[in-house]
């Protein structure tokens, strides 16, 4: 089965995605090598799930036998308004949990394509599947891997969620990787108060056909987002500077020039913002009720209170 790439992209935009690109499903051995080194250096902290399915992360054909194409999709999340006050949460968590929203959109996209291609089938992927989202978005021409280690799209910046459809269908035209546009800028690297972004001497310039070149890597244990979401300990490390963030962190992203100009893609009403602000004083029952459909439901109330105490320090 061969499907016109334009049909897939037009359908994706109609469903509500902000961008769509398509890459051939192939093995990425240099990415596998880089991932193994990152894990071997312990940069992933307690995220032991990253140690699983390493070869699958580098080859979507192991995820979906017979896969020929990876359809990569972006959904921007720059909000229409920002939290005010001394306590903040990451912008991606303002609205409905993106896992829920994007999963619905992926199934809708599959159903739309099946109208004209009844044999079309695909595995929807949004964060919980062992596939490298950033790598495939880069391969599909949707952006480049910035020094903040995130995908940077010219229109959305790095303020975008990534998803994929891995399918055995072929398309009539594939996209090409986008060149890195960060240049000598290192505003994101310098902005992090915990030095979580460090130079990666292993990255060369001859990897363009196999893995996205990047000039820094994330040391998760130093990252406020990791500490406030992934860390389950009763206390956060002494010296960890969160700059008021109690869930996630946007410090490196707010420093990026592309994010300053990014298109607004998430409308946050005054009522929604009031609800977010009220979490600071919420009891456990209120916290659970208010975060039921948000990404904040990923952490416990005890973690939330721990994060609030640390943010106030």
Image: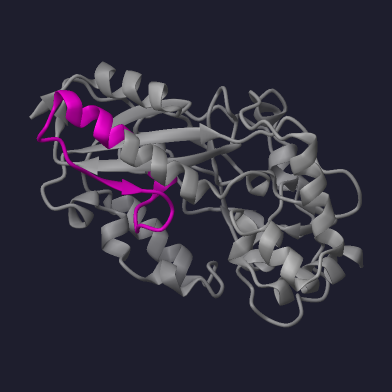
Residue 213 in view here: no
- Describe residue 70's horizontal placement relative to residue 66 as left or right: right
Which of 56/41 is in front?
56
| In-image side of 61 versus 165 (left or right) | left
Q: Would residue 76 be found to the left or right of residue 35 on screen?
A: right
Model colouring: one colour
Please name whichever residue, 44 or 109, is drawn nearer the observer in this view of the structure.
109
Q: Residue shown at 9%/35% (left/top)?
A: 119
Q: Measured along the vertical axis of the image, is residue 146 above or below residue 264?
A: below
**Residue drawn 17% across and 41% down?**
121
User: Where is residue 297 shown, x and y percent of the image?
Assistant: 61, 62
Residue 9, located in which quarter of the rendered image? Answer: top left
Classify the position of the C terminus by image quarter: bottom right
| Residue 260 figure quarter | top right
Look at the image and say whether residue 235 sits in the magenta stretch: no
Residue 165: x %, y % from top left = 29, 41
- Taking depth in this image into account, of 10 and 65 the one nearest to the observer is 10
Q: Where is residue 298 in the image (x, y as percent from the top left)?
A: 59, 64
User: Farthest residue toward the bottom?
Assistant: 234
* Residue drawn at x 75%, y 65% as measured from the top left: 286
Residue 115 shown in magenta: yes
Residue drawn 44% across the image and 26% down it: 19
The segment highlighted magenta reads 109-135
Residue 149 location (% of width, % of height): 55, 47
State the residue in front, 229 or 25: 229
Is the N terminus in the top left, top right, bottom left or bottom right quadrant? top left
Res 129 visible: yes
Q: How many labels does the image show?
A: 0
């Amino acid at each position: 089965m061969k499907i016109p790439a334009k049909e897939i992209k037009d359908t994706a935009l109609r469903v509500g995605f902000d961008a769509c690109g398509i890459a051939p499903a192939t093995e990425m051995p240099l990415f596998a090598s880089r991932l193994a080194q990152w894990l071997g250096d312990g940069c992933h902290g307690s995220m032991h799930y990253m140690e699983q399915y390493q070869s699958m992360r580098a080859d979507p054909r192991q995820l979906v036998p017979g896969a020929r194409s990876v359809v990569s999709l972006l959904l921007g999340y720059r909000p229409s308004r920002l939290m005010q006050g001394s306590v903040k949460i990451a912008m991606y968590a303002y609205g409905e949990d993106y896992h829920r929203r994007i999963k619905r959109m992926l199934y809708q996209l599959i159903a739309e394509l099946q109208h004209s291609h009844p044999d079309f089938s695909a595995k929807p992927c949004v964060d919980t599947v062992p596939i490298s989202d950033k790598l495939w978005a880069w391969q599909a021409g949707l952006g480049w891997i910035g020094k903040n280690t995130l995908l940077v799209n010219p229109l959305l910046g790095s303020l975008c969620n990534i998803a994929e459809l891995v399918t055995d269908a072929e398309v009539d035209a594939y996209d090409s990787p986008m060149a890195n546009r960060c240049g000598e800028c290192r505003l994101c690297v310098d902005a992090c108060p915990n030095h979580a972004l460090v130079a990666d001497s292993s990255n060369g310039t001859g990897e363009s056909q196999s893995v996205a070149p990047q000039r820094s890597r994330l040391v998760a244990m130093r990252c406020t987002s990791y500490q406030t979401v992934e860390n389950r300990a009763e206390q956060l490390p002494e010296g960890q500077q969160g700059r008021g963030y109690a869930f996630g962190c946007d410090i490196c992203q707010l420093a990026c020039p592309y994010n300053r100009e990014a298109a607004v893609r998430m409308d946050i009403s005054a009522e929604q913002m009031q609800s977010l602000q009220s979490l600071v004083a919420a009891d456990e029952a209120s916290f659970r009720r208010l975060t039921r459909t948000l990404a904040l439901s990923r952490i416990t109330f005890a973690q939330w209170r721990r994060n609030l105490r640390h943010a106030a320090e």
